[in-house]
């Protein structure tokens, strides 16, 4: 089991949650919001174990679950009777209303092993409208011995009334150094493999760890965009967009890769230091881009990608978005003759 101290990143979030426990001022409900795959559930599970541990170890500011008490043993076995997880049942896409009703029937009873009884909702966007409204009734008047930990990629996708009844905690992705350091130090991966997985996983620790068990996996096709011959070929770019089709996750992958690529272009333009880029093996391609884009160009393109990223959860056509993003970047890159690089 992962303790809070072993979680990759999220130091400010963990300090805030530990402080709430140490002061004895727990809110009835917390909302951990931030993009998928960055470790929100890992934080929530580790904090739940600490909250329910009967003999926490260490100073309150750095406390960890002991791992030996009856509560910790039940956590390790996955049999804790005072933890409820609202996740879709097998082969279901959403959390059913009857799951909410079952929770409402069981939650009022006193804890069997440890207080508080904790309700974990790993992705509250999977609640159907009827389920969300039913949950709201419980959040309005929760039992004194209950605590809700709600998670979502964007708080805007939840009912405002649910958000208003939670203490919102913003979770940001772990840093590049933290993710790559975990992959190398904890999982024993070579630095180059860890760096490639960080890029492939869009900077998200969860997918990076999952991909680590699949060596030799082919690189995503959009990595070709960095090649001068590809970014200058409109037909090739349209083919790449067509390959994304209606896949929202593939679009997210493209947008994340483009953002990290532009970050490398900017770093190369300003420093020309291979240690500062995620793609040190593609220095020729980075130099080609850096010679054609000013610092303002790169920042403007990155800002545009961020605006699209925040709208991905809406009803956008992934292929059309990919086409627009790729062709816009291509137009900007190919519009300029080579420039002299800036040196910091």
Image (cartoon, rainbow, N blue to C red):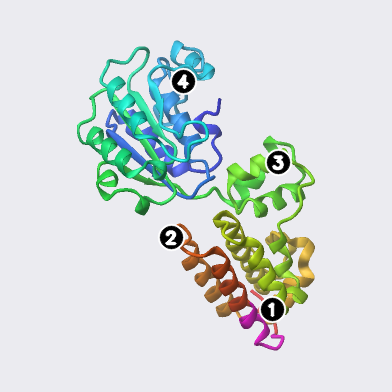
| 10 Å crowding of disc 4: few (<14), some (14-19), many (20+) | some
Evaluate if marks 1 and 3 touch, with contact meaning CB atoms under 8 Å apart: no
> What is the number of the mark on residue 251?
none
Q: Residue furthest left?
A: 141
User: Which circle, 1 or 3, is nearer the viewer?
Assistant: 1
User: Which circle, 4 or 2, is nearer the viewer?
Assistant: 2
Q: Secondary structure at mark 1?
A: helix
Mark with earlier residue (3, 2): 3
Q: Which residues are magenta?
A: 330-339
The reply to whether residue 293 is in sight is no
User: Which circle, 4 or 3, is nearer the viewer?
Assistant: 3
Please name whichever residue, 73 or 237, is drawn nearer the observer in this view of the structure. 237
Provide the residue designation for mark 3: 212
The answer for how far apart the CA atoms under marks 4 and 2 are is: 45 Å
State which quadrant residue 310 falls in: bottom left
Provide the residue designation for mark 4: 57
Evaluate if marks 4 and 3 touch, with contact meaning CB atoms under 8 Å apart: no
The answer for how far apart the CA atoms under marks 4 and 3 are is: 32 Å
Residue ID at (28%, 15%): 110
Residue 55 x/y as whole percent: 42, 15
Please determine whether, in this image, residue 340 is positioned above or below residue 63: below
Residue 150 x/y as whole percent: 37, 38
The answer for how far apart the CA atoms under marks 4 and 1 are is: 60 Å
Q: Is residue 334 magenta?
A: yes
Q: Secondary structure at mark 4?
A: loop
Mark with earlier residue (4, 2): 4
Please determine whether, in this image, residue 74 is positioned above or below residue 128: above
Provide the residue designation for mark 1: 234
Provide the residue designation for mark 2: 314
Q: Is residue 227 left or right of residue 321?
A: right
């Amino acid at each position: 089991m992962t303790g809070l101290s072993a979680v990759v990143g999220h130091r400010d979030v963990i300090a805030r949650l530990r402080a709430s426990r140490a002061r004895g001022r727990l809110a009835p409900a917390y909302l951990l919001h931030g993009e998928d795959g960055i470790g929100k559930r890992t934080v929530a599970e580790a904090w739940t174990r600490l909250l329910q541990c009967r003999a926490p170890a260490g100073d309150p500011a750095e406390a960890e679950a002991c791992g030996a008490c009856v509560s910790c043993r039940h956590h390790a076995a996955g049999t804790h009777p005072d933890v409820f997880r609202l996740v879709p049942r097998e082969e279901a896409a959403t959390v059913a209303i009857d799951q909410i009703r079952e929770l409402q029937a069981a939650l009022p009873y006193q804890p069997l092993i440890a207080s508080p009884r904790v309700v974990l909702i790993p992705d509250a966007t999977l609640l159907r409208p009827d389920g969300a409204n039913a949950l709201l009734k419980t959040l309005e008047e929760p039992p004194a011995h209950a605590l809700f930990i709600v998670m979502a990629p964007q708080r805007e996708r939840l009912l405002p009334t649910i958000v208003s009844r939670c203490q919102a905690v913003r979770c940001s992705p772990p840093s590049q150094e933290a993710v790559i350091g975990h992959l190398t130090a904890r999982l024993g991966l070579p630095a180059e493999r860890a760096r490639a997985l960080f890029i492939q996983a869009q900077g998200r620790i969860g997918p990076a760890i999952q991909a680590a068990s699949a060596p030799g996996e082919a690189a995503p096709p959009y990595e070709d965009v960095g090649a001068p011959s590809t970014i200058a070929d409109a037909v090739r770019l349209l083919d790449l967009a067509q390959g994304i089709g209606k896949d929202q996750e593939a679009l997210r992958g493209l947008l994340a890769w483009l953002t990290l690529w532009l970050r490398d272009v900017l770093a190369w333009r300003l420093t020309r230091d291979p240690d500062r880029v995620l793609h040190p093996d593609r220095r020729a391609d980075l130099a080609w881009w850096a010679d054609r884009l000013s610092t303002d160009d790169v920042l403007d393109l990155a800002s545009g990608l961020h605006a699209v990223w925040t709208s991905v959860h809406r009803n956008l056509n992934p292929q059309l978005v990919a086409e627009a993003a790729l062709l816009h970047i291509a137009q900007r890159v190919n519009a300029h003759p080579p420039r002299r690089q800036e040196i910091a």
